[in-house]
Image (cartoon, helix red, strand yellow):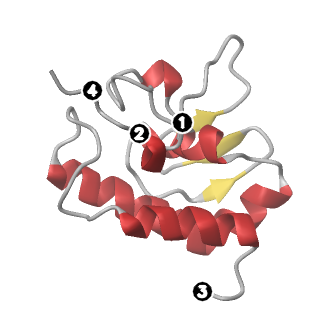
């Protein structure tokens, strides 16, 4: 999508580089990952430009715990918690059908974006 802001195009490209059949996190099944991935790419296409304009970062949207991936939701970005399609993005939250993901939670630690996640083996 050539009309995406550069940051959003990068996010989308990084997500597309991860196979929908190969979950990057050991506690996220391939089926769950396929849903997360599809929802995250949809977010980039539909709401990514708005997110960038509101100052959202890759970590706040796509972050995961550096060792435990999506298992530690206290490090996860708004899109890496439920795997649902977002309906709106606002200054402090991403809105889903029945819930929201916030970025203004006191003491929140943001992990690296999921495309930088490297599971420790052994």
For disc 1, the neighbor class at 10 Å (few under 14, some 14 to 19, many from 20) is many
The answer for how far apart the CA atoms under marks 1 and 4 are is: 14 Å
Determine contact: label 1, label 3, CB under 8 Å.
no
Check residue 112 in the rendering and tell me which mark sits there, or answer none.
1
Label 4 secondary element? loop
- The residue that mark 4 highlights is 120
In this rendering, would 104 be left or right of 68? right
- The residue that mark 3 highlights is 1
- The residue that mark 2 highlights is 117
Say which label, 2 or 1, has the lower sequence index.
1
The answer for how far apart the CA atoms under marks 2 and 1 are is: 7 Å
Determine contact: label 3, label 4, CB under 8 Å.
no
Q: Nearer the viewer, residue 89 or 3?
A: 3
Residue under the image location 50 percent in, 38 percent down: 99
The answer for how far apart the CA atoms under marks 2 and 4 are is: 9 Å
Rendered location of residue 5, percent (x, y): 75, 73
The answer for how far apart the CA atoms under marks 3 and 4 are is: 34 Å
């Amino acid at each position: 999508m050539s009309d995406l802001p550069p940051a959003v195009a990068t996010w989308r490209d990084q997500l597309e580089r991860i196979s929908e059949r190969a979950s990057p996190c050991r506690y996220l099944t391939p089926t769950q990952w396929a849903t997360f991935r599809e929802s995250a790419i949809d977010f980039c296409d539909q709401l990514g430009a708005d997110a960038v304009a509101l100052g959202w970062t890759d970590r706040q949207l796509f972050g995961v715990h550096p060792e435990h991936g999506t298992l530690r939701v206290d490090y996860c970005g708004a899109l890496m918690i439920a795997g649902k399609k977002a309906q709106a993005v606002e200054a402090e939250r991403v809105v889903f059908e029945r819930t929201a993901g916030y970025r203004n939670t006191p003491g929140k630690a943001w992990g690296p974006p999921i495309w930088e996640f490297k599971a420790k083996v052994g």
